[in-house]
Amino acid sequence: MKKQLLIIALGLNLIGCGSAEMKKETSPINGNNNMIEVLYFHGKQRCATCVAIEENAKYVVDSIFTIDVENNKIAFKVLEIGENEVLADKYEVSWSSLILVDYNDGVETVENMTDFAFEYARTEPEIFINGLSEQITSMLNN
C-alpha cells in the first residue's frame, strides 16, 4: 500500500512539474521570427570569468550592434539558471554558458560559445569581443 501511494505521489509531482514548464516562454522576444538572441546563463554564485563574460557580451551587443538592438534584430538576455529551467534544459545548460540563438523564419540555429567565452572573456577580452562580434555578424548575414 505504501509503495502504491509513493508511486501515485511521484506521478502527480511529475505531472505538476510538466504543466508548469509548458507555461514558460521559449520563443524569441516580441515574437520576432528573424532575430538573434545572445543568452548568458549563470548560477547564483559567479566567478570573475563569469562576470567578465556577461560584461563583455553586453558590451558587444550594446555598443557594436546598437542599431540592430533598436530594430529588434538582436537581444541580450541574462538568465539565472534556476529561474529559467525550461530554457536551460532546452539548450542543455547546467552552468554558466553563452548561447547564441538565430531565429530565421521559424528555423532556430544555436551556437554554443561557452568554451570560447571561458577561454578569452577575462584574460583576453579583445579576442572575446572580436570573436563574438564576428559570430553575431555571420549570423546576421545568413
Image (tube, grey):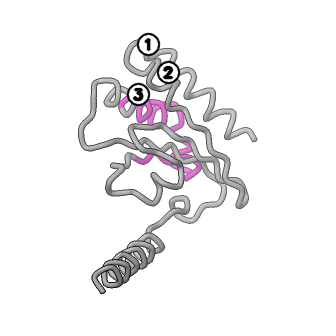
Residue stretch in magenta: 55-77
Amino acid type, label 2: Phe
Q: Is residue 76 a member of the stretch shown in magenta?
A: yes
Q: CA distance from mark 3 to mark 1?
A: 11 Å
**Residue shown at 44% from the left, 68% from the top:** 24
SS class, disc 3: helix
Chain-order first, disc 3 or disc 2: 3
Q: From the viewer's perspective, is residue 21 above or below residue 65?
A: below
Residue at the front extreme, as displayed: 1
Observer-side mark, 3 or 1, equals 1
The answer to whether residue 69 is left or right of residue 50 is: right
Which residue is denoted by mark 3 in the rendering? 56
69, 91: nearer the viewer: 91
Spatial CA distance of label 1 from label 2 is 7 Å
The crowd level at tag 1 (other Cα within 10 Å; few <14, some 14-19, many 20+) is few
Asked if residue 126 lies left or right of residue 106, the reply is: left
Secondary structure, magenta segment, majority class: helix
Q: Which mark is residue 128?
A: 2
CA gap between label 3 and label 2 equals 8 Å
At which x and y percent is residue 50? 34, 30
Label 1–label 2 contact, CB within 8 A:
yes
Residue 27 place in picture, x, y as percent: 55, 62
The type of residue carrying mark 1 is Glu
Circle 2: is it few (<14), some (14-19), or many (20+) Cα within 10 Å? many
Classify mark 1: helix, strand or loop. loop
Q: Secondary structure at mark 2?
A: helix
Find out whether the residues at labels 3 and 2 contact each other: C-beta distance under 8 Å: yes
**Residue at x 62%, y 44% (from the top left corner):** 110
